[in-house]
Amino acid sequence: MDKPSISLCMIVRNEEKYLPKCLSSVQRIVDEIIIVDTGSTDDTVAIAQAFGAKVIQMQWQDSFAHARNRSFEEATGDWILWLDADEEMDVNEADKLKELLTRDAIHEQRIEGIQFVFCMHLEGGAMEYNYLHRMVRNRPQYRFEGRVHEQIMPSMLKFKSDLQLGQFDIHVHHYGYLAKNMLSQDKVRRNITLLQQAIAEHPDFPYYYYYWGIELCRLNDLQGALHHFNIFLNMAYDDSQKGILASAHKYRLITLAGLGRYQDMVRHSMESIARFPGFTDLYHLRAIAFNALGETDKAIDSLRQALNIGPSEEGYPTTAGFGTYLTCQDLGLLYAAAGNSKGADLYYTLASLLSVNTAITFKELSDVVSV
């Protein structure tokens, strides 16, 4: 079976720092590179051309969807992959992409888009994992909508209401949420300006409020962020985009923690867990609130629940270590503070084992040792 061709489509502006690593990570598996440049003044264009990219110069029109769609118009591959310059596909996994595209479900056109595992690098070495949609069949009907945080799924569903997405366990590393990168290009304030315009145009579209809350978190405007998360959660009425809904519940708790509102954090965590019982992060965050309120036993119980669930179910934006080694580490700290050295040693040991990805689980260990 012939392997399908892939077009890489990107929009860039002054990305000389990250673009070489991004393009190097996929150059062996893409058949063409199409880059829309919206006004770079550094070496971005020269770098793109050195990788053989077709570069299209376009004036920025305050719309990410417009720029992305321009790149899609030039694509000739069977599939279109889109990345941002501050993203890299795992070079050890990229080579299997074309092989995966020959699977029967895809060959028979039952799958219209592909999700990859995104590793969001955050401050202090933290990382959040989530599946994100970054590949589609090259169809003229599939185009983006929205000035910022643009979406392609609405146009896909209009064309094929019963479409399916496939999930590939290929990791893509995203570095754009590190503070130094957000501030260097003033991306946060640019995004907020675009969100304000988008909300003025589409006031009933709830997801813009979620994204505005995320941007305000990056500016450390926690009160403003909480306000926008609450607007979104009051407007969102179904689970059609479970990942975003769950993320809003998670970041509301994180914002409340930053504001020191631990009673509210506990109350909202109960509501969130009732809606998303498989989202481990919510149990870990609830434990943080209980501990801050001096309710150690409840904090321990909540962490043990998180550990029993393990890593969050697919589709949830989970923090690396919640349900595994970070949860064990916090349990060790709580047991040590309570004077239970046996329990502390147990969880410190388990944290060490889980941090190196061993297969041992809390249940297996608890069958042997009781604390």
Image: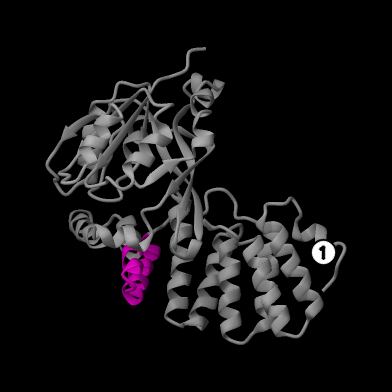
Can residue 167 be seen at all in this image of the molecule? no
Q: Residue furthest bottom?
A: 294
Q: Residue furthest left?
A: 59
**Magenta stretch secondary structure, dominant:** helix
Q: Residue at x 25, y 40 (%)?
A: 11
Q: Quadrant of residue 368?
A: bottom right
Q: Residue furthest right?
A: 368
* Residue type at numbered disc 1: Ser
Q: Residue at x 41, y 32 (%)?
A: 26
Image location (x, y in percent) of residue 79? 38, 26
Residues drawn in magenta: 214-235
Q: For numbered disc 1, what is the local secondary structure? A: helix
In-front residue for pair 146/18: 18
Left or right of residue 115, residue 229 in this image: left
- The quarter of the image holding the C terminus is bottom right
In-front residue for pair 240/84: 84
In-front residue for pair 237/93: 93
Is 186 one of the magenta-colored residues? Answer: no
Is 222 one of the magenta-colored residues? Answer: yes
Image location (x, y in percent) of residue 343? 78, 75
Left or right of residue 56, residue 344 in this image: right
Query: Which residue in the structure is indicated by mark 1?
Result: 366
User: Total marks drawn?
Assistant: 1
Q: Quadrant of residue 192?
A: bottom left
Image location (x, y in percent) of residue 348? 72, 69
According to the image, what is the colour scheme of the structure? one colour
